Amino acid sequence: MGWFRRLLQTIAYVTIFPLSKFIPADAEPIGLAKYLPAVGALIGMLLATCCIALQALSVPPLLSATIIVVLWLLVTGGLHFDGLMDTADGICSHQNLERTLEIMHDPRVGNFAVIVGICTIALKIAALSALITAVPEQMPLLLLLSPCFARLVETWAIGNYKYARESGKGKAWHESTLFPQDFFWAAVIPLVLLLTAVFKGHSSTLLLLFIGLTAASGFAVGAYLDKILKGHTGDTYGAVVELSETLPLVAFALAVSGSFCG
């Protein structure tokens, strides 16, 4: 299968876009990790376009932020969010490793999943609302870069850490990833977008701060989950994405809002 078919397969796998008809029915998710940031850029373009439209319509910041977050969840089919909730159920249960993995595999939603899920959505909405108020001109770019760089960190987690289960949907992703080669290939699109933004005159200080927060959050979350679970699973890949999007937005909103208030 050529690179374009693999890209379509990746899009079909991690979004709701109906591209499965272009993919063989028996196609396995082999060698797809390096395409994840490209899919993130596609998601980011949709979010950025939505933001621009909402700004043109003078929609209030809180409502705009809520619409953007809902669109964010819809486009991904809640795939990564589901992984975050399953991971929260397992990690917060404070059971031994075997039992923790069993809880994460259980399709039922527990109390910890609900709590973490609600907090994540609330924080993302609040952060976006604050940023729309503080730096409205930067918002389309931030929404473009956030999903893209979060999935670059996900590619790192997929390739760098061993798979924690003997089987699972994420195992093929891990075993077919050539690390670090695929990570370097995955970094091309995020870096091109970042350099283009700087070349176009956007604040390099703000962008580097935001990307730095995204990378730090993602690598820290990935390392923490690996320490607790002795590896990663398909659920934790989703958790890495969600937290690599949410935590930097919150930290960046605090930093930018504070500087503007001062």
Image: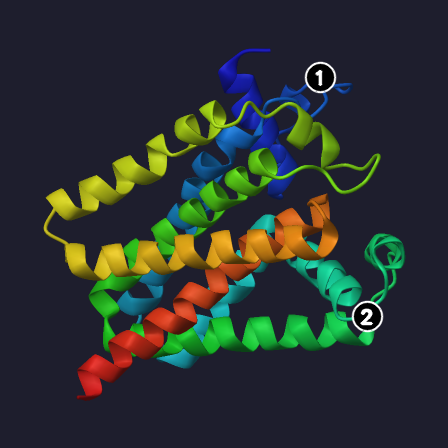
Residue 64 visible from this viewpoint? no
Q: Secondary structure at mark 1?
A: loop
Q: Amino acid at mark 2?
A: Ser
Q: Which residue is label 1 attached to?
A: 24
Q: Amino acid at mark 1?
A: Pro
Q: Residue at horizontal 84%, vertical 35%?
A: 166
Q: Residue at horizontal 31%, vertical 60%?
A: 210
In front: mark 2 or mark 1?
Answer: 2
Q: Residue furthest bottom?
A: 262
Left or right of residue 188: residue 84: right
Residue 63 visible from this viewpoint? yes
Asked if residue 242 is positioned above or below residue 195 in the image, the reply reads: below
Q: Which residue is label 2 attached to?
A: 93
Q: How is the image coloured?
A: rainbow
Q: Nearer the viewer, residue 172 or 81?
A: 172
Asked if residue 154 is positioned above or below residue 212 in the image, the reply reads: above
